Structures are given as C-alpha cells and as structure tokens.
Image: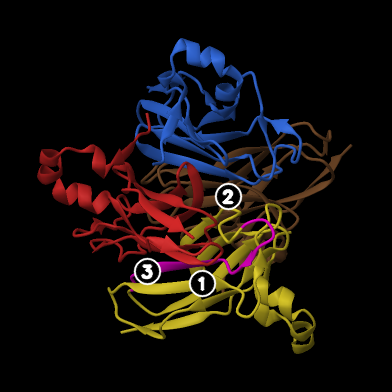
Chain colours: A brown, B yellow, C red, D blue
Amino acid sequence: MATINAYQALDASEKEAKKDYIDRHSPFITVANNAKAGEKLPVNVRLGKDYSHPDDADHYIAEIKLFDGETLLASAALMTGVNGGQGAKGQAEVTFFVVPQKKMSLTAVAYCTKHGLWQSDPAVVLVG
Amino acid sequence: MATINAYQALDASEKEAKKDYIDRHSPFITVANNAKAGEKLPVNVRLGKDYSHPDDADHYIAEIKLFDGETLLASAALMTGVNGGQGAKGQAEVTFFVVPQKKMSLTAVAYCTKHGLWQSDPAVVLVG
Amino acid sequence: MATINAYQALDASEKEAKKDYIDRHSPFITVANNAKAGEKLPVNVRLGKDYSHPDDADHYIAEIKLFDGETLLASAALMTGVNGGQGAKGQAEVTFFVVPQKKMSLTAVAYCTKHGLWQSDPAVVLVG
Amino acid sequence: MATINAYQALDASEKEAKKDYIDRHSPFITVANNAKAGEKLPVNVRLGKDYSHPDDADHYIAEIKLFDGETLLASAALMTGVNGGQGAKGQAEVTFFVVPQKKMSLTAVAYCTKHGLWQSDPAVVLVG
C-alpha cells in the first residue's frame, strides 16, 4: 500500500533515533500566516530543515505537491541532477504562488524514489 | 492533511451506504497474477467498477498513479474533458506497461479534484 | 531552445543514416481511424516501432504526452526502471482512453532524458 | 501537430498587433547571469510581463517546464483556481531551485489549456 509518512505521526524517541533520515525526507513549508484575499502569496517548500538529501540517479526527490486540505493546488516534478547530481546532497525546493480566497490549511507531500511519500506539518494561512 | 482514502478501510455498512460515491472514486487494477521476469506486462487502472465519475471542469479525475509497494512506477495526468466533458460521466482509465524483475505489490492512487486521493486494493503479481 | 524533433521533418537520407536512433525516440500512435462520439476510445502510444530504447537511470523515456491539435489530453510520467532498468532496453508504452466528441488530430510527444522532445506523426480520428 | 510558440519568432508588427495575447502567454525567466558551481540558484518563471492570463476552469495555465538546452530540469503543474479562479486574472508563477555545474541556457515552456505551448526567450547563466 502507498502510505504518506508524516513527521508528526512519529513519537519523540523515533524522531530522535532517525533524526537525519526523517528531517531530510520531510517537506517544510514557509509561508505568511496572514494573507489578503485575491493577492498573490508565495509558498516555499523545502526538503530538509537541518539535513539534506542525496541527488543520485537512483535516489532523489522526484516530486513535491502542495495541498490545501484535500485539494491539490500545484505539483512540481524534479529531475535527478537538479540538486547537484551524483554524489551531491541538496535540499529540494520550490516556491509556488497561489492567490487565496479564504483560509487555507496547506500541506506539502514529497516523493523520494527510495523512501516513498512524506508529508509536512500543516501550515494555516488566515485570509482577510 | 492530505490523506489517501482506501476502499478496504471502510466497514461493510459504510461501503453499502456510500456505494456509488466510493465505487466511482476507487481505482481498480486489472493485471495478470503471474508474469515473466523481463517481459512487458500491461497494468490497467480504471476508476469505478460499476459506477462512473463526472468529467466536469470543476470535478474530474486529474491523476492516476501506479505504485509497487512504496515505489512510484508511473503516473498519468488527465485533463478535464478527456472522459466526455461537461455533463458527461466516464470511467477514467489508463494502461501502463511495466517490465517486472521480481514480485510486485501494485496499488493505484487516483486524485479527484473535489474529493481528494483514493487508493485501490493491492494487486500482487508473482514474477517467475 | 527547447525544440520538438519530428520524424517527418527529416529527409530520406537522414532517416536511413540514423534509423535506429530516430525510430527508438519516435512515438507511434495506434488508434482506430473511426470512432463514435461519446464512446471511450483507446489510444496506444509506443516508443520505437522496430528498435527499443535504453532504460538506464541517466537515459530513459520520462514522459509521453498526447495532444489533439494544440490541446493536451493526457500525459504519462514514467520512472526509470519501468522498462526493465539498468542495461535493459524496452519500448516505453502507455494506453490512454479518451471520449471524443468530434474529429481529432492526435500527436504524441515523448521526452528522452538525453535527447529531448520527440513527436509522432499525426493520427486523424474521424468521429461520427 | 504540437508546436511551441515562441515570442522571438514573431516579427515586430505581429508583436505589436497581438501584444496582450502574446505577453500573457509568454513565460519570462528571472535569474542571475552568473552563478557558482554547486550552489543553489533560484530560477523564477512568470507568465506575462505586463499582462495577466485568465484563470478559468476552461482556460488556464496548466504547466510550466524549465529546460537547460534540450534537457528538462523541472516541471510545475498548476490546477485551475490557483491564480484566483473564475473571473480572475493572474500571472502564473513558480520559482525552481537548481544547482548548476556548468553554463546553462535556460528556457521555460508553458502550456495554456486553450492556446497551447509557449516558450520564453533563453536566459544564459554563466557558472564559475
């Protein structure tokens, strides 16, 4: 079964034991907490806060998707090599731009070609 | 949070009560149970066994992905209108072709623009 | 500049000299010449008629798109390994299903990670 | 046949006559002219310099791809509504992040669901 791994589903000891592994697979959203309805809002998604992920041909971050609740907003497909290629480590990253109309609860889902789907913490954006 | 709905996670009464809704959102895999290593194998994925899904501009099946365990094999993006367009209902469908090397446990994940992610039952393919 | 290579743009001597190279990068569409409006129609796209393409991590067919004229109908993204993986050669293939309403002029565009975009001959489908 | 429209292929009078139409379909790349090998580089792509494109369910910018020469680096798929939705106009935009190793010649290709594929001017990045 395809499952979506989520950082917040892990307990404290798991998080500590696998800190590097979990961090570099987890998408982190950076976005303003408040936005204006009808105005463009940048939403940055980066994989790894403190650690970085390999960018090898057989092991790389291939996809980053942005959801508002259950609704897909945008999706980025990355080819291997974009983060430095063979032997390099990098933090897969993309900035999407959305024009919200009302409150959003954003989550990002990333896909690692070896370790499957990973989900960010939700980021709530109030829209006034 | 983005979650993947799964047909088999529902109990019998839920399945009965929402039969149409669940059926038309669930991907169904058709594939041989046995395959030869190194030989091409068609894997058909269709949404809805008995029911069919709208293909309206604001409500359609936009994506069908095929996984082997946690590993993405292939992905199809469908534009609205491909299944008949405004007012029509259809069964979103795609046939992927994979060349397996060993036993696979396939699942398909589909995305409905109104009702989010849905997962098929797993289909095991023995490879000899 | 990104350009779309097309089999039919080449002259006879080029086609002969690079027969293998061109054939294995060219998408070939198989579809009925006549279809019924509102009925589901399979459209098969395969890369290579007589030759087959490597499926190595640094050299594989990553995308197959289907257009009706200038309009995108559907797109398939293939991960490396789907056609046999390291050292194997295969014919990347997908079958899309479309429900036409009127005459279509289909072309397929494929993307090779080393040799760019390649376009099929158009396939006209009369719809009655 | 699928073709890629390009701003620079048009002559001056065409550009003047269809200024709005061409501008809002053309991707514009913003990137530094010089980059350091192995360091992350943001590449912004925006559709429309002076004009903006509708974001209606039947007419929106669905895809933005970034190429280095003939090589695909990354691709963004946008769902309708991301730029404001029904009745709104917006400038579809995404920032990719790439880690270059050598000189790049970037082009962006965007897809409008009504008016097909459009290509940016190339942006050369010297990498030292």
Three-letter residue code for mark 1: Val
Residue B20, percent across and down? 72, 77
Above or below A83: residue A122: below
Residue B45's tag is: 1
Q: Residues within 10 Å of mark 2 (few under 14, many from 20)?
A: many
Which chain does the numbered disc 2 sit on? A
The residue that appears at 37% across and 60% down in the rendered structure is C33
Name the side, left or right, on which D61 lies relative to C49.
right
What residue sits right under mark 2 in the picture? A64
Q: Is residue B93 magenta?
A: yes
**Which is closer to the viewer, label 1 or label 3?**
1
Q: At label 3, which amino acid type do we have?
A: Val
Q: In x, y percent, where is residue A80?
A: 41, 47
Viewer-nearest residue: B62 or B117: B62
Q: Quadrant of residue D11?
A: top left
Between residue C38 and residue A106, name the one nearer to us.
Answer: C38
Q: Which residue is mark 3?
A: B98
Q: Is there one chain holding both mark 3 and mark 2?
A: no
Q: Callout 1 environment at 10 Å: few (<14), some (14 to 19), or many (20+)?
A: many
